[in-house]
Amino acid sequence: MTQATTPLRTEVAGGVGESPTRPDGALKVRGEFAYSSDMWADDMLWGATLRSPHPYATIRSVDVSAALALPGVYAVLTHEDVPGHNIYGLEHPDQPVLAETVVRYQGEPVAIVAAEHPETARRAADAIVVDYEVREPVTDAEAALDPAAPVLHPHHPTGNVVRHVVIRRGAPDPVADVVVTGEYTVGMQDQAFLGPESGLAVPAEDGGVDLYIATQWLHVDQTQVAHALGLPVSKVRLHLAGVGGAFGAREDLSMQVHACMLALHTGKPVKIVYGREESFFGHVHRHPAVLRYEHGATKSGELVYVKARMILDGGAYASTTAAVAGNAATLGVGPYQVPNVAVDCWGMYTNNPPCGAMRGFGAVQAAFAYESQMDRLAAALELDPVELRMRNAVAEGSVMPTGQVIDSPAPVAELLRRLRERPLPPPAAIPADLREMPGGVSNTTHGEGVVRGVGFGVGIKNVGFSEGFDDYSTARVRLEVIAGEPVVSVHTAAAEVGQGLVTLQAQIARTELGVPRVTILPANTAVGSAGSSSASRQSYVTGGAVRAACVAVRTEVLERASDRAGRAVTDLAEVDLVGLLGSAAVEHTVEWRHRPTFPLDPTTGQGNAHVQYAFAAHRAVVDVDVELGLVRVVELACAQDVGRAMNPDAVVGQIHGGTAQGLGLAVMEEIQVVDGRIRNPSFTDYLIPTVLDMPPMSVDVLELADPHAPYGLRGVGEPPTISSTPAVVAAIRAATGRALTRIPVRPEHVVGD
């Protein structure tokens, strides 16, 4: 990776390190931003989906005659109507576009309908008659490991095991002075984005289709859709529509193929918008997990070994389970130096809802377990929990359990030190303001039975795609004169999902080219892939691509200026761009890659699997009504190393948002799945933090540059989700004395026997 050596023209406002106004910000807060569900086309039809009511069943027959007979219905399609291949998958093709002979989870699509009105489409879907033979679902991921368990995918070579990851380092049978064990359970969390799945498919004159879609990865969608439609990729054109949040759930396909099938079948534009309940069935969720840990340490508190056994419930289809298991295993001992490690992680098929990417991607589940263990070990050693963490914290040069050396700053101890030294909030006043009490204005307490607790958590997350994945992004940058003014246009396929990437791309162009006027073109598949807006990677990888394309443009401009001047021109500040360019333009397209990663050894789990590590730590202060089990988070403080704060306001916003999702998992967010059926598919019953639940936050941002990354930056969005959950739970433990080995923590866990 070559860094630019030409001097930068940084005097232009709105460049790297500043916080310019987001171009979409005002529109969003005024409610004027066009999301994917707002799209419209003349003569448009509406699509609807018939889904299985059963977690596991054989399909005997499907009768669509009553649906087709309804006035206003244009098409009713089943698996027999899939024009290409009736199978897709983000990493491993194993999921049918429409179920053929078997359904493997409640909500699996069986048929799709197009009608002139959305209510007509829904009534037509309800009129389809499916004869099911219900089967006993496999809903326990650990039981699915049993060789006697029904095999849900008969052609899968390892039965119900999507992936088994093994990490072995050091002595096989280490001995320690002090040993603590624990079993921890993580519930199924939803991404809970506000904008439901939606898109508009428009048939084209060339026999292809244009799909306007809210997604995280345009090109991987394009490939899968084209495969299902039996069309060349060039005839399936995707355009990014307004995305109302993602957090991993939009990496997999939802209604993309369905809308395109209906549009091509009817010859009309077709729009599909999921309602909130359908959205719970229409996307993947965070993997539920059971994690068993054993930590051994010396009497003075140095870690000797960690053993872990993790079971991740991947649900009915693979999605990203293999990669999530890889993350959980490789990051499974946390940001600690451990000479002896034995980790086994299984990602399993079950008949529960499919699980895949969600912010934190395997590191969240592991962090709850290993941080709970560190608190348990501190108690056994009679050490301060922060001191124990600092004593064992990794630093630059430390060796991870995979044998990978951390080759950039890793200020874990410093993050913890800063949090420990922060003053604590004052105790609640008595008589209390009800708004500051657990239970709030429901008047459950005036302070009696309320106990305060303080807890800490720290986490580690990889940035970018790992284990040898060809991780790259493409950027096209054009410099030209429009109306007598130099203008830069930047074109990538990177999905703006709310993180502020459109702002950052413009900041990079201003910094590298010294031109204040920058236009970010709409993301689509007319330019090369930018990869997914996930893994905290877009600032790094697409930022790197935009920077590299800008450097290529700048180099050509300086060469032209040097030729005209008859001398070496090395600074764009010396160049009259309007006079030099005239009616010409300078344009470069660059495909940019970070340094390579490598697969894990399948026997030992050794290998340089990750391109970058990122670290965050939290301190949580809670008040707990120990009689009723109600919790109020009083304060959250976060310290995080971001390498370089490319956009300081956006960095703080990401840390706040990630922390909120971690708080939600700690005390309220869980999809209730009973016998494979979702019991709370609504925002009435699936609870997410509101402004009343989020406490005041302090954020301490460190900028210790990673020398291998563009501008020295680190991915920001995921680490705060990882460390906030264990910090909140640790604080509740401190207040109650309860073990609290399951998240989210419920009132009965606090007050139960």
Image: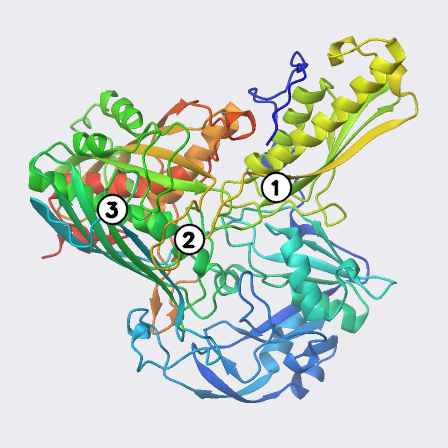
Looking at the rendering, in which quadrant would you find the C terminus?
bottom left
Q: Nearer the viewer, residue 457 or 370?
A: 370
- Residue 660 locus on image (x, y percent): 39, 40
Residue occupying image coordinates x 43% and y 78%: 152
Front label number (1 vs 3)? 3
Q: Which mark is residue 600?
A: 2
Front label number (1 vs 2)? 2
Vertically, is 387 above or below 210? above
- Residue 151 locus on image (x, y percent): 40, 80
> Would you say 140 lies left or right of 739 here?
right
Q: Which mark is residue 370?
A: 3
> Would you say 496 lies left or right of 553 here?
left
Q: Disc 3 marks which amino acid?
A: Tyr
Mark 2 residue element: loop
Vertically, is 729 above or below 191? above
Q: Disc 1 marks which amino acid?
A: Glu
Instruction: Identify the image quadrant of residue 523.
Output: top right
Which circle's residue, 1 or 2, is located before the other in the chain? 1
Vertically, is 415 above or below 187? above
- Residue 371 locus on image (x, y percent): 24, 43
Q: Which residue is mark 1?
A: 496
Q: Nearer the viewer, residue 424 or 398?
A: 398
Q: Disc 2 marks which amino acid?
A: Leu
Marks 1/2: CA distance?
31 Å
Q: Are marks 1 and 2 in contact (CB under 8 Å)?
A: no
> Would you say 258 lies left or right of 620 here?
right
